[in-house]
Image (tube, rainbow, N blue to C red):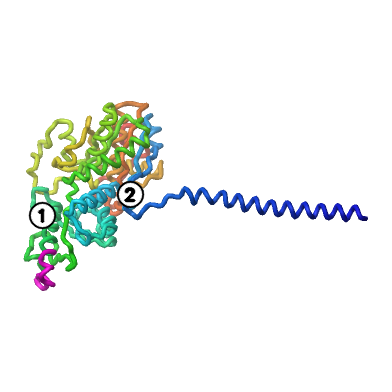
């Protein structure tokens, strides 16, 4: 019996040893597994540092349909939800550096939506506030987002840029009024408190009783259309990122233009890196940029440049298309342009949602129309990059509203890409 006892003791000892060894091994593996995650985890210093470095994705359905590699830069993944976050950060940082803007000041802007939302998103990170003047025909959810972000929103009727009450011109005046108010507030506690006026000023089509906070520390007009900080944001950021993400292996870039900053900054950077890269504009209905790029003049038979006093746009897309050449657009280096239609943009958005799971806004959809047009123009085997500016979340009341689309004859009906001539 003694040998059996010895054998049992040995087995027990081995079992204990194995258990201890397993425990130590598991503990070691656990430590080893968690260590690199902790070591390699990158923490960004606040919201501002989360702007940019967005991913580039292959748009599979369009790539397979055209025989080209069509890539989209996912700018809708910026903290504020659009490509305009880059512009907002650059404009505010340059203004603070130049002392045109101070902490506690108000950034004013005339915007169709996305730039305003980006400014309202990042301004608090710099200790500033935001006042936005917006056309009253813009999707209502954009105003709701702005107000939720703490911005003051002033809605005005859409008119030509030549009109003093164009939303951009009103925003410019608001910055001047904020500066005047800041100066007076150093001497008095209240200005026109009971009159419903700001500095005695009142104009038709503007919200009455607009009063900046008594703690306003001056104003700064962001001026996204003419401020070249817009261009620099893309020349120094978006363009280099595209070059790095494609390892320089791209043949074409295409995007629509509103302010012109994106298409200008990216096109100039890419063509400085490689002059063989072709850069194109895709232009929505009602815009004159297609004529400017292809013919050198911005007019049609129906209207002369700068003469139209009513709303110059007739398009469901928002944030793109314009009837003047901005300082930012003048920096663009373009090889050609394509026209896109509202129906194509609507059809493209539904096609991408169905086939790629991409829920894109109107300008992003138009950019993808442009990418297909470029692919058809230069042929298969090329790599084409475009910008996915924002998601469809800001376009629910119009671009993704079935009733609204039906009223304008834009109900999507396509099963594939036949609306672009692809069977």
Which image quadrant for residue 189?
A: bottom left
Can the viewer see residue 102? Answer: yes
Tell me, for residue 88, which label it has, or none: none
Residue 214 against residue 6 in the figure, above or below:
below
Residue 35 against residue 129 in the figure, above or below:
above
Which image quadrant for residue 347?
A: top left
Mark 2 highlights which residue? 51
Q: Position of residue 103 (x, y in %)?
A: 22, 60
Is 164 left or right of 6, judged from the image as shown? left
Can the viewer see residue 135? Answer: no
Which image quarter holds the C terminus?
A: top left
Residue 298 against residue 310 in the figure, above or below:
above
Q: Nearer the viewer, mark 1 or mark 2?
A: 2
Is 10 left or right of 44, judged from the image as shown? right
Mark 1 highlights which residue? 165
Under tag 2, what secondary structure?
loop
Please provide the residue range marked out in magenta.
Answer: 182-195
**Main SS of the magenta segment?**
loop
Total numbered circles? 2
Is 61 magenta? The answer is no
Between the residue at mark 1 and the residue at mark 2, the CA separation in whole angstroms equals 33 Å
Under tag 1, what secondary structure?
loop
Q: Position of residue 116 (x, y in %)?
A: 23, 54
Q: Position of residue 373 (x, y in %)?
A: 29, 32
* Residue visible at 25% across and 44% down in the picture: 233
Counting residues from the N terminus, which is met first, the one under dot 1 or under dot 2? Answer: 2
Is 7 left or right of 286, judged from the image as shown? right
* Residue visible at 16% across and 58% down in the picture: 219
Is 183 magenta? The answer is yes
Q: Residues within 10 Å of mark 2 (few under 14, many from 20)?
A: many
* Residue visible at 8% across and 51% down in the picture: 163
**Toward the viewer: 31 or 108?**
31
């Amino acid at each position: 019996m003694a040998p059996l006892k010895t054998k049992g003791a040995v087995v027990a000892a081995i079992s204990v040893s194995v258990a201890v060894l397993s425990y130590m091994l598991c503990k070691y593996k656990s430590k080893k597994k968690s260590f690199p995650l902790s070591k390699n985890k990158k923490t960004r210093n606040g919201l501002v540092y989360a702007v940019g470095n967005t991913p580039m994705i292959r748009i599979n359905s369009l790539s397979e349909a055209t025989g080209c590699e069509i890539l989209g830069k996912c700018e809708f993944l910026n903290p504020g939800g659009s490509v305009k976050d880059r512009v907002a950060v650059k404009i505010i940082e340059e203004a603070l550096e130049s002392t045109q803007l101070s902490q506690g000041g108000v950034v004013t802007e005339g915007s169709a939506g996305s730039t305003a939302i980006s400014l309202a998103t990042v301004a608090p990170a710099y200790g500033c506030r935001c006042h936005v003047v917006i056309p009253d025909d813009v999707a209502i959810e954009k105003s709701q987002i702005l107000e939720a972000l703490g911005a003051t929103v002033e809605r005005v009727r859409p008119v030509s840029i030549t009109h003093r009450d164009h939303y951009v011109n009103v925003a410019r005046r608001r910055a001047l009024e904020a500066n005047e108010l800041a100066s007076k507030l150093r001497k008095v506690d209240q200005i026109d408190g009971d009159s419903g006026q700001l500095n005695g000023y009142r104009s038709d089509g503007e919200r009455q009783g607009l009063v900046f906070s008594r703690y306003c520390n001056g104003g700064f007009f962001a001026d996204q259309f003419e401020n070249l900080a817009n261009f620099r944001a893309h020349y120094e950021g978006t363009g280099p990122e595209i070059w790095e993400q494609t390892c320089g292996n791209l043949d074409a870039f295409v995007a629509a233009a509103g302010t012109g900053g994106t298409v200008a900054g990216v096109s100039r950077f890419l063509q400085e890196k490689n002059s063989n890269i072709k850069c194109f504009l895709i232009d929505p209905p009602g815009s004159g940029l297609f004529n400017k790029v292809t013919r050198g003049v911005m007019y049609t038979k129906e209207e002369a440049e700068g003469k139209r006093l009513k709303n110059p746009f007739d398009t469901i897309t928002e944030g793109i298309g314009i009837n003047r050449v901005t300082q930012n657009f003048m920096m663009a280096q373009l090889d050609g342009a394509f026209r896109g239609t509202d129906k194509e943009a609507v059809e493209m958005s539904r096609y991408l949602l169905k086939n790629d799971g991409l829920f894109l806004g109107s300008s992003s959809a138009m950019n993808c129309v442009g990418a297909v047009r470029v692919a058809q123009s230069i042929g298969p085997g090329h790599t084409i990059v475009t910008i996915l500016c924002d998601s469809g979340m800001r376009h629910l009341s119009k671009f993704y509203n079935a009733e609204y689309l039906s009223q304008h004859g834009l109900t999507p009906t396509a099963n594939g890409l036949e609306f672009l001539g692809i069977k």
